[in-house]
Image (tube, coloured by chain):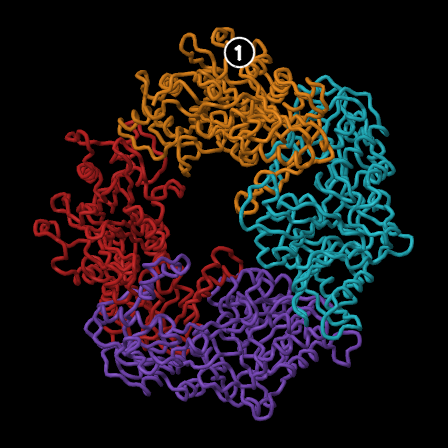
Chain colours: A cyan, B orange, C red, D purple
Amino acid sequence: MANATRSCPSVNVGTCSPATSGMGLVNNAFPPEDLLKMRSCNLGIGHTRYSTTGISELQNCQPFVVDTLHGKIAVAHNGELVNAAALRRKVMRHGVGLSTSSDSELITQLLALTPPMEEVDAPDWVARIKNLMHETPTSYSLLVMYTDVIYAVRDPYGNRPLSIGRLVPVSKLHTAVAGEGDTEGWVVSSESCSFQSIGAKYYREVMPGEIVQISKHGIKSLSIVPRPEGDLPAFCIFEYVYFARPDSIFEGQMVYTVRQQCGRQLAIEAPTEADVVSTVPESATPAALGYAQQSGLPYVEVLCKNRYVGRTFIQPNTRLRQLGVAKKFGALTDNFAGKRVVLVDDSIVRGNTISPIIKLLKEAGATEVHIRVASPPIRFPCYMGINIPTKEELIANRPEFKDIAGYIGATSVQYLSVEGLVSAVQGGIPSIQKGERISTKPSRRVGHCTACLTGKYPVELEW
Amino acid sequence: MANATRSCPSVNVGTCSPATSGMGLVNNAFPPEDLLKMRSCNLGIGHTRYSTTGISELQNCQPFVVDTLHGKIAVAHNGELVNAAALRRKVMRHGVGLSTSSDSELITQLLALTPPMEEVDAPDWVARIKNLMHETPTSYSLLVMYTDVIYAVRDPYGNRPLSIGRLVPVSKLHTAVAGEGDTEGWVVSSESCSFQSIGAKYYREVMPGEIVQISKHGIKSLSIVPRPEGDLPAFCIFEYVYFARPDSIFEGQMVYTVRQQCGRQLAIEAPTEADVVSTVPESATPAALGYAQQSGLPYVEVLCKNRYVGRTFIQPNTRLRQLGVAKKFGALTDNFAGKRVVLVDDSIVRGNTISPIIKLLKEAGATEVHIRVASPPIRFPCYMGINIPTKEELIANRPEFKDIAGYIGATSVQYLSVEGLVSAVQGGIPSIQKGERISTKPSRRVGHCTACLTGKYPVELEW
Amino acid sequence: MANATRSCPSVNVGTCSPATSGMGLVNNAFPPEDLLKMRSCNLGIGHTRYSTTGISELQNCQPFVVDTLHGKIAVAHNGELVNAAALRRKVMRHGVGLSTSSDSELITQLLALTPPMEEVDAPDWVARIKNLMHETPTSYSLLVMYTDVIYAVRDPYGNRPLSIGRLVPVSKLHTAVAGEGDTEGWVVSSESCSFQSIGAKYYREVMPGEIVQISKHGIKSLSIVPRPEGDLPAFCIFEYVYFARPDSIFEGQMVYTVRQQCGRQLAIEAPTEADVVSTVPESATPAALGYAQQSGLPYVEVLCKNRYVGRTFIQPNTRLRQLGVAKKFGALTDNFAGKRVVLVDDSIVRGNTISPIIKLLKEAGATEVHIRVASPPIRFPCYMGINIPTKEELIANRPEFKDIAGYIGATSVQYLSVEGLVSAVQGGIPSIQKGERISTKPSRRVGHCTACLTGKYPVELEW
Amino acid sequence: MANATRSCPSVNVGTCSPATSGMGLVNNAFPPEDLLKMRSCNLGIGHTRYSTTGISELQNCQPFVVDTLHGKIAVAHNGELVNAAALRRKVMRHGVGLSTSSDSELITQLLALTPPMEEVDAPDWVARIKNLMHETPTSYSLLVMYTDVIYAVRDPYGNRPLSIGRLVPVSKLHTAVAGEGDTEGWVVSSESCSFQSIGAKYYREVMPGEIVQISKHGIKSLSIVPRPEGDLPAFCIFEYVYFARPDSIFEGQMVYTVRQQCGRQLAIEAPTEADVVSTVPESATPAALGYAQQSGLPYVEVLCKNRYVGRTFIQPNTRLRQLGVAKKFGALTDNFAGKRVVLVDDSIVRGNTISPIIKLLKEAGATEVHIRVASPPIRFPCYMGINIPTKEELIANRPEFKDIAGYIGATSVQYLSVEGLVSAVQGGIPSIQKGERISTKPSRRVGHCTACLTGKYPVELEW
């Protein structure tokens, strides 16, 4: 179970439909009604969390809206600019005061600030967006709204996800009751899984570096800003491992299937002499099932979640704190008492959550507990939008890691290799994704950001 | 997925420890801190929901506390008195005004009202409780608190569950960090699963008809009030099927294991030619795994839950209402596209939730969807504390039930038989439960309430 | 400025109109809309605060509603029963558990408990109310609602106020815009001033000991329960001094006019050589104007209220606490700098609020500050519903009272005499009040409760 | 009773003390604790309402804080820039996006934007403030905070008030209890009345055009930016008439005394044959007392405020809406029945509030009701921060104004003349105010903004 949190889980956008000029909007964190309500404004963008670089001020709430000489623009941002500090200095040197510490305001003022030469009367927002993309390589997925157009933008490294969905009329959905007030249109979201919630269908991803325009005339790919010669794409591999919902689609493959494949790969790399395979519910379940399928060991459940425990972190009490994570799970004793258990987890960050689970299982009768982790150890900080504990807190960097099994009380511990993870992820990517143009082919070579695992960052980090 | 709700999920009690005179208390619905906080009062009882017979007034909140000539008594009640109306008339005829419509107040006033003859100075609460038990056969599990004693009471039919747990010092729990402020003591709860949350161990059940006294002198079985000659116990079989948490223990067996056994039995009664077996998450998972084990078909996940959807019922929107239940689940397409799916559910009450799930799976590529239900059809109302829809709303009583597969869009539909359910439940009960005395043996014969499935109520219903 | 608070400021009732069968309802503490909303129930009673004898539990909220053999009754109560403890024992001895510590529940159970002999089928609520009135002499104003009738009841001593108002159709009110949805009817409230807020006219008081019936057939005086031979009425004199709103009417006279008369009387009893007369706003203003009129000294304002200060008591801060009451008032320096000020207050309870005001005036330039208090010193506790500080806290019982002027920093301090207060109150009562019947004449002799000033309680206090 | 509202009631500032380097802060709308809490930051500014020109967005909340190349600056603003639209265009033309529609952000960005030539390393904030003052003539009182300095600024016309107070150690205040944690320092507020609430003493006003610096080195007048040759100051005369609290001091005189003088002047201009003089409480009371003193007629109270009515505007109900304003007041009948009443009000804006009051008095027995208004009719909009109804809504611009007495139901209506108001205001101003320097003398000539009464605006209005 990873304790890392993703700063900006989604950037979402409402779009307009050619047929009906109705609008759609999607978000996987706001309750869908709120977003659909915004449809009456014809266009809308929403966002869900504060930026990681800014303090938790109210002003850091997205989207950021400003009035410019040409009217209002609104910007929603998912990611974290690697060169934010330098860009802030540049903007302030121009005489602009920044009222928040968020990247969204910074991006908005950068867009307002730098009119390319050729502009005379009307603003050339696409040129301004390209300008911006040349000034900051990563990481960002953006939605920029101006009067009747929304631009969906993904940085040249494609570090953060961004997907396009098509809003289907309810009358055409078998799962829905037909009715009035029906709409067509386009929706954009960090996670494609949110499309289903409002009756939209996955259409395609925004490509790394791509600027997609959505308006009442439909959807149009305007441009693809290239990466520096030789650089590979760098989509965050941790989205596959932990963050994304299992029914989301990235790079043409379903996250669930990738996780299952990680479990299979793990069974190949780290086979175990044991009686049953199980999961730390619920996030590790696909990997555990993959491990079971590959190894031929029977899959059983050994833990059930206690739904009432979440609140204990809010009003802590000495005894309950001492009981720790164990109280979050009930042991399904009959399934493993007297047996050797392989327990698959998706990731181990600090090591303090898995330990009491192992003790719980042993106390309830497991003769052996083998921990198999469906991702490599995390060793390095992320500067691109994922809140990872400091280097010192990461179990993989601590002396205890040498005897990790002893430290956490497991019979054995084994991790998936970086190569194994990369192959599980890249092995399932189809050779050409939907919506991809031939001309973008050279830059389409496969690549992922594994910085938190390897320390190899996709771009040089400026401070 | 059953839409029935249980009125009174738990009656819980704090108890006192001989060793340390510390107190413990447990509840599986209140956040545990709140309950432990009550420990400082030395004794405490808590409860979680409104009674089913009373309107949802604030006053119906439990426990019910009244001041009597002998001091305060507090009563928490799980269940529904089958002869509540007659008892209300009796109390009011004595000149008592009832300020709520709850059974808890009724029981409290009955206890206050009827001093047995032999009382002179001090109240004989045990005699009063026995009196009460002779006036109302079922259904109730009670906690009655008076100054420094708590009485845990289960009706002679044992219709509602009631378990005793022993609070273990944190220092003796491997899963916990040792610390100060440690406590020993006894806890009582409807569901034994709640014990683990506060570091208590399952001890035993309160027997049907038993009055157990908990005080600083420890725990003591005072009496067992017998059933009428020839009557069997009548523990609610639906606790096994749907309500209880899977890691709870009733009658010496774990609920999860019973559900898994129901799945195995279902595979025997209703085998299917198919490619994969899956579950409607999360409650049907043990039955689905049992079905897979018995049938030899591979178990896969086909649906993932959308956690953000719960709120849509609060602020409904036309489009979202039309999308219905489908938006609650994401389809894990890769696991079943092009395949024949056996989808195991725990129960079908109204039939309106399973239908869109089937459509979702078919739309995503399932070639066949066979519904297998791990319990028999519900046909009759419950008068003992379970909120079941009216007879007219129950799918099993509607004309559509004749062609239920066609009605819900499934390839085939099959239910577990009543006999199959009963054998799955009773097959695993050990011959003698812990804490059971030889003298209770005759009344210990196994029996369950299957009224909602068969219409055979354990007692004659008075109105 | 008195720091005492009245426990139950009002008991209010909606009543039905013969003409339109519309209903009216009034309350001077609930927002009027809430009350009018209740009109749709045809009859309704409301109340505003917790009883003084009960702890601040939610259950003590009024009105108290219980179900009896004959249906629901609801009781709202203003006052405090002098023999509550004895009555509680009586009720509990009958076997009734009391779920709150409020007098309202006690009264309700007493009404439910004691069916007079002659009742056969239908309950004789009037006989039960008379029974109750014989069991408890004071203090209470009651509203008892049963199906389609409300009984308005005042204790035989008339200790707590109760007034009847007539709801006038909006179309007949000059101050209102005519419109649809118009209503007629009767309303009952502790304070007649509340009538105007909803467009009702003051009709008359409920007499001491009177039971008034309000139904769709109109209003009817049923009975007057007499006091013991020789006892005078005992309406709380502090309602005139401090609690009531100045535009309320008691005993045929307006409270404002009584207070002005107290000021005049005070000027006769305690004349002052000074330059200006002023008030501690706002409650002392009528007395101050009376003092100015009688003495011939000019009336000016010397203090203005700071509206933002109220909240300081919620989030206290050391400096602000040190600043104390002075920060609640601004000094209108130009009106008194270099002058001798007579400052009239309505009452002095603890003496800690007037002291900083005097210092504020002196610091701002007043050469002398003479305090004149328009009521006698409070020396005794109230057992009839007024929260007065303990005997020890009352300034009049403390050693400092000997040199009260020196203690609070005033040039001189003088109080109105008890005789002066009584004469100011009784001098303005008309010889016969509206609605009074000849037969009640003997019991109509004038009398007031001055227990907090004299220690003479209207009835013997039972414990 | 005026229905106009003032946009920005106060700009407040905490300042530092030379002696203790403790800090003080004051605000008459925030609860004082909040402000004092800010003291721990050593410097702080606060504000209370949204700007009038901006929509009610959360972002319009003051103070506005931005990060610049030189660090953070915070700006609080009271007033409304007459050339805001032109200045916004200027800022946006420079490429700055404005995230709110408030003047505060506009001023902040103007200060960030325009570095005067001579700046090399450190920012010259005083030069930037002077720059700003040359770009916008009125109306603003500003507080600008930068690291350890606060600048208090008033526009050259002095349209909005700004006063300086000295925080006195609690130990030196007679009205306060001595204690630890004592502080000295300087505080700045729109209204001097707020000083007393936290134990500060009025020191002096910031002069029109003046820039005052407050730091740990104390208080220092840096500069006075002059008005164009020949222009008079233009302090808002409506602060005297209606907005300010009566114990505030402007231009060396107390607001209460000015209002009393307006009442006297009104008695001279509009004498009445009548029996009593009274007020519409509470704002008109000083004018009513002045009228009574000048005319020799006795002053009485005829209305008492109903404190519970405020909430009726939140949940309106047909009947209560029809009852209108009358329900806000109780009639003190005894004081005026059978008499001719002079009712003094401070202003009449729409005419719809005074009308039902007159009817209430007549219905309760007043034989004549003469309305005397202690200010001239409002005829013109304000563009400098006061929310006045549109020209069409103002009663003085409507046809009904011809027979205003008939329209509102009064026996007669008379207003104070503009000349009378100006003489009442200017007659009491001392020839030299405290803190004024000789060199500022020429620009010190007396003058007030009477634009809403006369249409003569102090500066030409740009759009």
Asked if B417 appears above or below C84 in the picture, the reply is above
Q: Nearer the viewer, residue C140 or A376?
A: A376
In this rendering, position of residue C320 left or right of residue A395: left
Q: Secondary structure at mark 1?
A: loop
Asked where in the image residue D326 lies, by quadrant, the reply is bottom left
Q: Position of residue B215 (x, y in %)?
A: 49, 22
Asked if C72 appears above or below B195 in the picture, the reply is below
Amino acid at the residue labelled 1:
Glu
Asked if D14 appears above or below A207 in the picture, the reply is below
Can residue C298 be seen? Answer: no
Q: Position of residue D110 (x, y in %)?
A: 68, 75
Q: Nearer the viewer, residue C3 or C358?
A: C3
Q: Chain of mark 1?
A: B
Can residue D175 be seen? Answer: yes
Considering every residue shown, the one lying at the far right of the view is A230
In this rendering, position of residue A451 left or right of residue B111: right
Looking at the rendering, in which quadrant would you find the C terminus of chain B? top left
Asked where in the image residue B20 lies, by quadrant, the reply is top right
Q: Residue at x 12, y 58 (%)?
A: C432
Quickly name the residue at label 1: B436
